[in-house]
Amino acid sequence: MLYQDLIYSLAFLKKFSSSFPEEEINLVDFSSCQHLINFSCNLENDLIQKINLLCKGCILFKASSNAICLEIEGKSKKEGIKIIQKFLNMLDSKCEENEIHEENLKLFWKFQFSKTRKDCVSAGAQAILNYLLTI
């Protein structure tokens, strides 16, 4: 599968789709794209389960948000937070590509070099991280 095909398949993944009422969607503060996200999950035996994700916006925003969900599902809350923090560090050039072991997240390695695209890729991850830190 080609690189761009992998990104598109992540963007249109329906595994975590939910039906949050429109008024419950959070606008991510972002200057050029109007990204909307709502994320929730259950912690069952400290494992992230029953992920619900509703996100609207550009392909990269949706793809990276779904990639994060794929990688944290079934992991402990602590491990999920660590995965997201490492992903955000990767986008800020604070870690090497070989330090990222999650294949779906490695797809976004190149976007650390593009300011506007990096913001699209990191916005959903940051929103999901914020949620996990509050539950």
Image: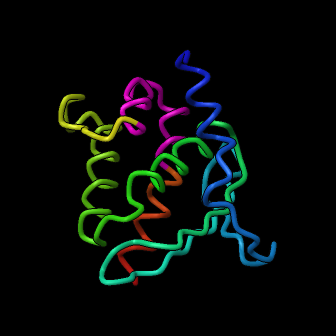
Report the side of 59 relative to 88 (left or right).
Answer: right
What secondary structure do most residues of the magenta stretch adopt? helix
Residue 90 shown in magenta: no
For the N terminus, the quadrant is: top right
Q: Give the magenta-colored segment's residue range.
A: 104-122
Residue at the far right in the pictured view? 22
Viewer-proximal residue among 26 and 18: 18
Q: Position of residue 125 (x, y in %)?
A: 46, 54
Viewer-proximal residue among 134 and 83: 83
Q: Position of residue 80 (x, y in %)?
A: 32, 63
Res. 76 image quadrant:
bottom left
Report the side of 107 relative to 33 (left or right).
Answer: left
Res. 7 image quadrant:
top right
Q: Position of residue 73 (x, y in %)?
A: 42, 62
What's the residue at 71%, 47% (across, down)? 57
Q: Position of residue 110 (x, y in %)?
A: 41, 23
Residue 121 shown in magenta: yes
| 26 over 24 or under it: above or below | above
